[in-house]
Amino acid sequence: MSKERFIQIESKNALLELLREGRDFERIYLASSAYRDEKTKEIVQLASEKHIPIIRVPKKTLMRRLRASNSESVVGMMISQNQWELSELFKSIYSENKMPFFLILDDLKYTQNIAAILRTAFATGVNGVITHPSDVNLITDETIRISMGAAERIPLVEMNLFSAVKEMKKEGMKIFGIHMEGETYFKVDLTGPCAFILGSEDTGISTGMLERVDEKVSIPMREGIGSLNVSVSAGVLMYEKLRQEVS
């Protein structure tokens, strides 16, 4: 399904969520002086049940491994294979009788925003995230830590965005662009198979992508506010779609 790589998980919360979901770990490092709180106990129990090696090391040794934290006593080396082909993802979604609901990330730059978006996306039932091909992995230990594991739990597709939109429209999906000149979001029918395009933090949706949307949607704001943070805008739209689907 994808190229294999390792991601270092430095958050107990993320580590627990991923272990509970059955993700593969090559090994887990545990500080020999670690305080055995309930989360640590559960991590050790789940790892033992799954026959994941637990390597006890001195606290100083573990701290030298840490990248995003300076206090964690448990670190997991997860085997990540979260790279999909779009056609493969459609087959998987349809085989589970689910409705395609995607996000298209058009050159987002900041890890904090990406992680927040992916956390909300997982909570609202998004089942695919499309990004430009890049030499830099979108999913890193930091995005997983900030999203508390959600970043690794949503299928990721890296491909040309124009081609992705073309394939989605062939599958009957509607493409919405979040744009200040669009129709107010709660007046727009967001139900059914669709994708939201989220533009970059500084310039928004690129011109080429904006030309390919079926409809622009906007979020009303008080005078004097030009735009919301992209992760906030994304959250508003994702939950509005969820509200419309269940109402």
Image: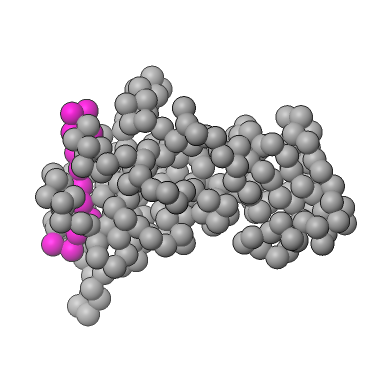
Q: Is residue 17 above or below residue 22?
A: below
Is residue 34 visible in the rendered image? The answer is no
Measuring 50% from the left and 34% from the top, which residue is drawn there?
3
Is residue 124 visible in the rendered image? The answer is yes
| Residue 174 on the magenta span | yes
Q: Where the C terminus falls, by quadrant?
A: top left
Measuring 73% from the left and 64% from the top, which residue is drawn there?
71
Stretch of the chain drawn in magenta: 168-181
Measuring 27% from the left and 41% from the top, which residue is drawn there?
160
Most foreground residue, 136 or 87: 136
Looking at the picture, how far across and down is residue 136, in whole percent?
Answer: 45, 51
Q: Is residue 32 above or below residue 93?
A: below
Most foreground residue, 207 or 243: 207
Looking at the picture, how far across and down is residue 98, in whole percent?
Answer: 36, 27
Q: How many marks?
A: 0
| Residue 244 on the magenta span | no
Considering every residue shown, the one lying at the far bottom of the view is 224
Looking at the picture, how far across and down is residue 189, in whole percent?
Answer: 18, 44
Q: Is residue 208 above or below residue 83?
A: below
Measuring 78% from the left and 36% from the top, which residue is drawn there?
53
Considering every residue shown, the one lying at the far front of the view is 135
- Quarter of the image for residue 198 reads bottom left
Looking at the picture, how far across and down is residue 192, in whole percent?
Answer: 24, 35
Is residue 112 found left or right of 133 in the rendered image?
right
